[in-house]
Image (tube, grey):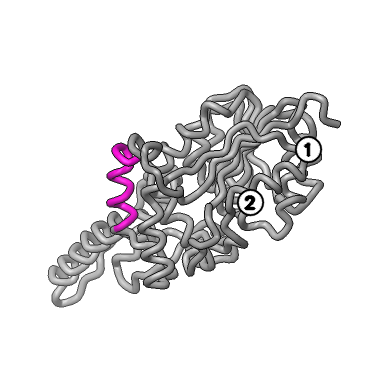
Amino acid sequence: APLLKSIPIRSRSFAIEPEITAKVAKRGCRIFEVPISYVGRTNQEGKKIRFRDALKAVGAMVRYWLVDDVYAPDEYGSHILTSLERAQRFNRWMADTVAPHVRARVLEIGAGIGNITLWLQPRERYVASDINPAYLHYLENLRVGRPYLQVAKVDLGIDEDFSPFEGQLDTVVCLNVLEHVADPLGALRRMRSVLAPGGRLVLYVPGHPWLYSSLDEVLGHRCRYDKAALTAELEQTGFVIEKLHPFNRFGVPGWFWNGKILRRRHFSRVQLKIFDLLVPILSRLDRFVPTPGLGWVAVARRPEDAA
């Protein structure tokens, strides 16, 4: 019931059956067929009704194959974030960028539905965390066949959520999360607390305050970081920066046009799909482009002699 309540249902006819099936499948649930007894609707024009029902079913299949309308609006912005999470080539690019810095015992903050998580496995120990109950339920399904995978609710604002992992891990992965929290210094200190001396924080945040737009507002971004601000926060919380470089330079024009010029409050699925198709080419050219990136990738270390 909680799963179905979190899915927006648009159909008011026979199409509700294929709509629910398509959306549950897109949410990554395992579906089992069971035998049922079924008697189709009939009246004096019984054949026409069955034909109309069949057309509605096919129409719903095509519509919800093309449209990723699988999360109802909620306090976590699931309906917005899921459109970004469907960009699988982009997710792979992000995962490939951070993977060389990820070690054996990992805590991932804000794992969502696991699009980055799956690319960073297997590991000796991997804790995938989030605060969204729907995402946590989804992540639990990923544990099948992965004995090293643990799922936990970890809120960057709550000390107690970090206590079970204190000093036990060698990597914290935090992508697209720090910009959401009200107390970034507290969040960084909590992430530092779970790292053993020498452990790494692998971080991604949106870049450049001048890019802040309506898209940031709808995503709940507290800010966009410049290099100096991000460096200052990491150093204030006891981290030593090993690497800090821009990421996704080709995404800047689209973000500026949609957010600053058009003031949009949603992402164009067509634009996202086109961009995702081009990622294999853009990812190879990105480092050669002498312009700012849409965000920053930072690798910071807890010093060996840190208390």
Tell me the kind of residue under disc 1.
Answer: Ser
Q: Position of residue 128 (x, y in %)?
A: 61, 39
Q: Position of residue 186 (x, y in %)?
A: 77, 50
| Number of residues whose C-alpha sits closer than 10 Å to that of mark 2, classed few (under 14), some (14–19) or many (20 or more) | many
Count of numbered labels shown in the rendering: 2
User: What secondary structure is found at the residue carrying circle 2?
Assistant: helix
Q: Position of residue 6 (x, y in %)?
A: 51, 61
Quick check: 151 above or below 211? above
Q: Quadrant of the N terminus?
A: bottom right
- Residue 258: name its quadrant: bottom left
Quick check: 10 above or below 128? below
Q: Residue furthest bottom?
A: 44
Q: Does the rendering let one see residue 252?
A: yes
- Residue 44: name its quadrant: bottom left
Q: Does the rendering let one see residue 32?
A: no
Quick check: 135 above or below 13? above
Q: Position of residue 41 (x, y in %)?
A: 25, 69
| Number of residues whose C-alpha sits closer than 10 Å to that of mark 1, classed few (under 14), some (14–19) or many (20 or more) | many
User: What secondary structure is found at the residue carrying circle 1?
Assistant: helix
Q: Quadrant of the C terminus?
A: top right
Tell me the kind of residue under disc 2.
Answer: Leu
* Residue at the image position 62 percent from the left and 22 percent from the top: 124
117 left or right of 163 in image: left
Residue 178: assigned label: 2
Boundaries of the magenta span: 271-282
Tag 1 residue: 193
* Residue at the image position 31 percent from the left and 50 percent from the top: 275
Magenta: main secondary structure equals helix
In the image shown, does 226 or 95 lie closer to the viewer? Answer: 226
